[in-house]
Image (cartoon, rainbow, N blue to C red):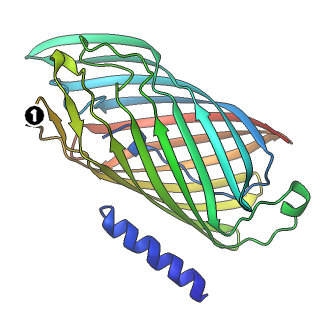
Amino acid sequence: MKHTVLILLLILVLVVLFGSCSTAQAQQLEPRAYAPAPVGVNILGVAALYSTGDVALDPSVPIENLHARVRIAAPFYLRTFDLFGRQASAGLTLPIADVDATGDVLEQGRSIDRTGPGDPVFRLAVNLIGSPALKPNEFATRRRETILGTSLTVVAPFGQYDSNKLINLGTNRWAVKPELGLSQPLGNWDLELYAGVWLFTANDNFYGGKVRRQDPLTTTQAHVVYAFQPNLWASLDFTYYMGGVSTVGGQEKNDRQDNSRTGVTLAVPLTAHQSLKMAWSRGVAVRTGQDFDAVGFTWQYWWY
């Protein structure tokens, strides 16, 4: 019990440091991101996301009254492995996006349509406390326990980008997010809390030949998960993100993020090796241009 209290205090301090409670990554709701799994598992799948509303694809873009419909298909692959006796995982996601948007540029109505690859995302995670590296037969008899994990997410600037266009699918910069995640089991329930911060390199080829920089963007997530059975679960999700003020050509923009979202997720098994996850979310408190509804479906197939 003392060990668990110390972990909770550590996470609380980190949440305060990270903003206590933008980018599209900051808005993600990811329940069970640090859930235990046996080592040697391969997961192949595809996520489909549809969102509509006032979507700020880039907060410093000089567009008013922007309304967009965003469709994303994102195939991914993930594998769990043993890292110095701890359960770890590495995954790669390759999104393809289709965006159509309308807005006012210099008080003139404009519409755009973009289709192509987005920036790929790589994530490496390891559980520091709880969830040691276990083979499938050992994992089946494990005892549920408190998990403290950490991860590093890297977004690479390989998506479609044209500095002559105001709206792009890629960002032309690197972004990394170190994160800590706590998962506390309570019977069939899991209480989860994550705290992380996005760090960005400069986009040295922004619209008009200018340099765009962005301050760190802190993010927290909270999830309440109930498992009906091992592969059938539902969760109530919440995220809050703040910061991320941008500077374009040396001029600071009034685009500080201070937003929150809530959502629900349901995962159901299809076969012994397949599952389908359905998610819905919407903005709750929005300061800067991220007021949209989103629905997503994720199919995955796993094997040893």
Placement of 163 over or under 292, stated as above or below: above
Q: Is residue 289 visible?
A: yes
The residue drawn where x is 79% and y is 72% is 143
The residue drawn where x is 50% and y is 24% is 72
Left-right relation of 214 to 53:
left
Q: Amino acid at mark 1?
A: Gly
The residue drawn where x is 30% and y is 39% is 291
How far from the left and from the top, in percent, is residue 251? 8, 35
The one of 135 and 32 positioned closer to us in this rendering: 135
Image mark count: 1
Which picture quadrant has residue 78? Answer: top right
Q: Is residue 21 visible?
A: no
As drawn, which residue projects farthest toward the right? Answer: 137
The residue drawn where x is 33% and y is 23% is 68
As drawn, which residue projects farthest toward the front? Answer: 84
Placement of 46 over or under 279, stated as above or below: above
At mark 1, the secondary structure is loop
How far from the left and from the top, in percent, is residue 28? 46, 44
Quadrant housing the C terminus: top right
Left-right relation of 112 to 225:
left
Placement of 24 over or under 70, stated as above or below: below
Left-right relation of 290 to 27:
left
How far from the left and from the top, in percent, is residue 129? 63, 70
Quadrant housing the N terminus: bottom right
Placement of 90 over or under 48, stated as above or below: below
The one of 236 and 76 positioned closer to us in this rendering: 76
Label 1: which residue? 250
How far from the left and from the top, in percent, is residue 206? 23, 22
Which picture quadrant has residue 169? Answer: top left
